[in-house]
Amino acid sequence: MRITSIQLQGFRNYEDADIRPCEGITVFTGNNAQGKTNILEAVYLSCTGRSHRTVHDKEMIKTGHDFARVKVEARRNDGMHDVEIVLSQLERRKIKVAGNAVSKSGEMLGHITGVLFAPEDLRMVKDGPAERRRFVDMELSQLRPKYYYALQRYARALKQRGALLKEASVDSKAISMIDMFDEQLAESGALIMDMRRDFVKKLSVKAGEIHSHVSGGLEKLSVEYCPSVQSEENGEKLQNAILETLKRARVIDLKRMITSIGPHRDDVRMNLNGMDARAYGSQGQVRTCALSMKLSELKIMTEESGESPVLMLDDVMSELDPGRRRMLLNMLSGVQTFVTCTDIEDLSGAECGKIFKVNSATLEEV
């Protein structure tokens, strides 16, 4: 896949922009707070339907504007694809795929695909399970839209079950309705767990290979899926296991007024030489773990779709030592890559196809 056009209107600090990246490495360089990351955010939004920086659409709309518009066009093996998103101060966002309006965000997934590596991705290693679940969820949603829809169904049932658990403290009739949502959680939860387990197995193999290369064979990285529901089953048997676990936990759930088990409690653990990287990894090891995870994600998406997604590197070159930087640049062959940096020297040795100087949301090709 190759992105051919990025159009921004009223997005973040951009009034209007029509960016034509090259097929190889496109660099956006300039001082901080000039709009470099905003370009990557717009592309990531067209890939996933989400920003990596905010959950509020209004924050992406330029001050004084009623709406923001992002349109990204890409050439894939089967022809041209485009995704257009309009964010509004007053209305729900509107999405078009190939010029046709779609009612659900899931319908845009898979048309423009991308992998983003930003400084905040270090949280994937060091922070709590939610960051690692988010990483898995975002990538699986791009690969398999049915996973995205299962997450949506699960989230709705979880919210409704949570409301009933609270209501049951004052109205015992609410308890009789919990069974229905247990069934819904088990059905969508089994699908989520099956897909997570399969994805993490692939991730562990790829990330382990990449990490071994980066560390010169001195460190071994493995990735482990740690589900809240302990079951090696799949399909209907896994669904029954989730249902039984929910029933056993109901007394505790009623007391705490929360759902204590299920995929929303899963974790993904990264082990370095058998030790939990979250607890024992140095800053350099954490960076290498995060980089290995992102590059393995790129490889999996390429293998499963038959074409490489765009790789976005947001101000990460300065965070890497020269050895890791060279290794990363060597892996970019054949991958369309967007890089932001404040110092172009961070890309010394890279074959950059286009370089844009960004200054107050104005781009100048140099």
Image: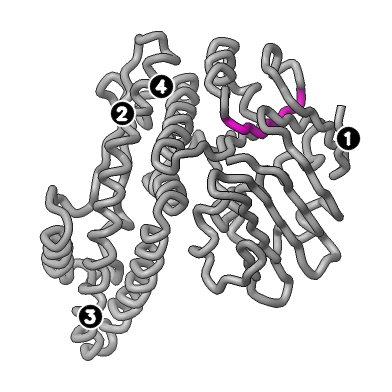
Q: Which amino acid does label 2 sit on?
A: Val
**Residue 131 sits inside the magenta stretch:** no
> Which residue position holds label 4?
210
Label 2 residue SS:
helix
CA distance for labels 2 and 3: 39 Å
Residue occupying image coordinates x 65% and y 70%: 94
Label 4 residue SS:
helix
In contact (CB < 8 Å): disc 3 and disc 4 = no
As drawn, the label of residue 364 is: 1
Of residue 184 and residue 195, the one placed in the foreground of this image is: 195
CA distance for labels 1 and 2: 42 Å
Label 1 residue SS:
strand
Q: Which amino acid does label 4 sit on?
A: Ile
Mark 3 vs mark 4, foreground winner is: 4
Label 3 residue SS:
helix
Q: Categorize mark 2 by other alpha carbons within 10 Å: few (<14), some (14-19), many (20+).
A: some
Residue occupying image coordinates x 61% and y 63%: 97
Q: Which of marks 4 and 1 is nearer the N terminus?
A: 4
CA distance for labels 3 and 1: 58 Å
x and y, in percent, of residue 193 in the image: 26, 53
**Residue 338 sits inside the magenta stretch:** yes
Q: Which amino acid does label 1 sit on?
A: Glu
Question: Quarter of the image holding residue 83?
Answer: bottom right
Mark 3 vs mark 1, foreground winner is: 1
Residue occupying image coordinates x 68% and y 12%: 349
| Magenta residues, start to end | 335-343
Question: Quarter of the image holding residue 154?
Answer: bottom left
x and y, in percent, of residue 243 in the image: 15, 67
Q: What residue type is labelled 3?
A: Met
